[in-house]
Amino acid sequence: MLSSWDVMSGMASLDGEVLVHDQTGRNVAMAAADHLAAGGVSVTLNTQDATIGMEAMRLEISPFMKRFYQHGVGIQTDQELVSAESADNKIEATFRNMHTGALSRRLFDHVVVEAGTLPNDELFYDLAEAAANRGVTDLDAMRDGRAQPVTEEDGYRLYRIGDVAGSRDIHCAILDALRICANI
C-alpha cells in the first residue's frame, strides 16, 4: 500500500490498474489520480463520501473532472475501503457501501491511500521553548478575531498553523495566519 505522496514525489512508479482511495476529501487524492492517469495508468478513484473532493474547493474539481473523463478515470463514491489483501500477485480491495452495507471486491495491481499527513512539527517544538509565548495560541482569541495575548518576555512569538498543526491545505494555513496576524 502506498500514499499519495509516494506517487506525487515520484518515489513510486506504478502501472496496471491502480486504486486511489481518498479518506480526506481534499485535492491530494485527485492530484495523485490525475498524475497517474496522465502517465497512462488505469485509475479508479474511490471515496466513502457522496462525491469526490468533498473538502476541496469547487474551483479545483472541474479541471480534475475534465481530465478524469479524458483519461477514463473510474470514479466510485459511497464506498468505504474496508480491506486490501494480497491475492495472486494482485491486491483484492473490499468495499462496503455506505448506505446499504453491501460488500464488493475488486482486484488491483496497486493501492494508493490518501489519509492525510501527520503534523510536520519538529521545528516548531525545537523553537517553542525559547519563544516568548512558548508556542501557545489562545484559540478563543483566534476564533473571536482578537489579538493574541502579549507577554512581558522579550523575544519572538511562535504559533502553530498549517501542516504544523495537522493535515491541512495551504488555504487553512493562510486563514490561520490571517486570524493570528490581523491584530498585530
Image (cartoon, rainbow, N blue to C red):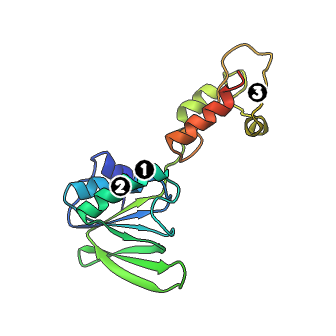
Placement of 27 over or under 138, stated as above or below = below
Q: Residues within 10 Å of mark 2 (few under 14, many from 20)?
A: some
Mark 3–mark 2 contact, CB under 8 Å? no
Residue 38 position by quadrant: bottom left
Q: Secondary structure at mark 1?
A: helix
Q: Secondary structure at mark 3?
A: loop
Distance, label 2 to label 1, CA atoms, is 7 Å
Q: Residue at x 24, y 61 (%)?
A: 71
> Which residue bears the numbered disc 3?
147
| Mark in front: 3 vs 2 | 2
Q: Is residue 138 left or right of residue 1?
A: right
Q: Residue at x 51, y 68 (%)?
A: 49
Q: Residues within 10 Å of mark 3 (few under 14, many from 20)?
A: some
Mark 3: which amino acid?
Ala
Which quadrant does the C terminus fall into? top right
Mark 2–mark 1 contact, CB under 8 Å? yes
Residue 85 position by quadrant: bottom left
Q: Secondary structure at mark 2?
A: helix
Dot 1 or dot 3, earlier in sequence: 1
> Which residue bears the numbered disc 1?
60
Mark 1: which amino acid?
Glu
